Amino acid sequence: MTADLTRLRNGNCPCLSGEQYDDCCGRFHRGNADAPTAEQLMRSRYSAFVVLDPDYLLRTWRATTRPDAMDLDPDIEWRRLDILSTTKGGPLDTTGTVEFAAHYRLDGERGIQRELSRFVREDKRWYYVDGDVR
């Protein structure tokens, strides 16, 4: 994880929930809790990209579609997450989708990654399955 983690522990969560990082996505990253909804898993996965935590991303990726390893680009500066829509994905659902736009900067250029992500709930835990980049 990056040196920004110290700053995050004392500030707002990068997922823009309005909560402190430790009380929001940080608790999921540390393994103290599981995200109760597909949207919260999406937010915590975005935050894992911000803090460069590939282990969390792999741990929350469904085994049938998960890559063997992940290399995160430390030069990408993730700036903002917008949740555009959700379908199902609640605490009692078994599937859900989250459409999001993740804003970033790379080499001084602005960019947006927009994706419709699919999630599945197995053994009371949400997992990222895959997504369609838009």
Image: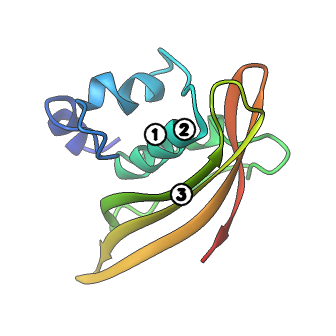
Taking depth in this image into account, of 95 and 68 the one nearest to the observer is: 95
Q: Mark 1 touching mark 2, by CB under 8 A?
A: yes
Within 10 Å of disc 1 (Cα), the crowding (few <14, some 14-19, many 20+) is many
Residue 3 in sight in this render:
no
User: In the picture shown, does residue 94 fall above or below 116?
Assistant: above
Mark 1 lies on residue: 44
User: Residue 103's x, y, as percent?
Assistant: 35, 69
Mark 3 lies on residue: 85
Mark 2 lies on residue: 41
Q: Residue at x 25, y 31 (%)?
A: 19
Q: CA distance from mark 3 to mark 2?
A: 14 Å
Q: Is residue 57 left or right of residue 109?
A: right
User: Residue 128's x, y, as percent?
Assistant: 67, 45
User: In the picture shown, does residue 134 fall above or below 6?
Assistant: below
Q: CA distance from mark 1 to mark 2?
A: 5 Å
Q: What is the three-letter code of the residue carrying label 1? A: Ser
User: Residue 95's x, y, as percent?
Assistant: 76, 41
Depth check, mark 3 against mark 1: the one in front is 3
Q: Residue at x 20, y 38 (%)?
A: 12
Question: Colour scheme of this structure image?
Answer: rainbow
Depth check, mark 3 against mark 2: the one in front is 3
Q: CA distance from mark 3 to mark 1?
A: 16 Å
Q: Which residue lies most toward the right here?
A: 64
Q: What SS does tag 2 mark? A: helix
Task: Please tell me which of labels 3 and 1 falls first in the chain.
Answer: 1
Q: What is the three-letter code of the residue carrying label 2? A: Leu
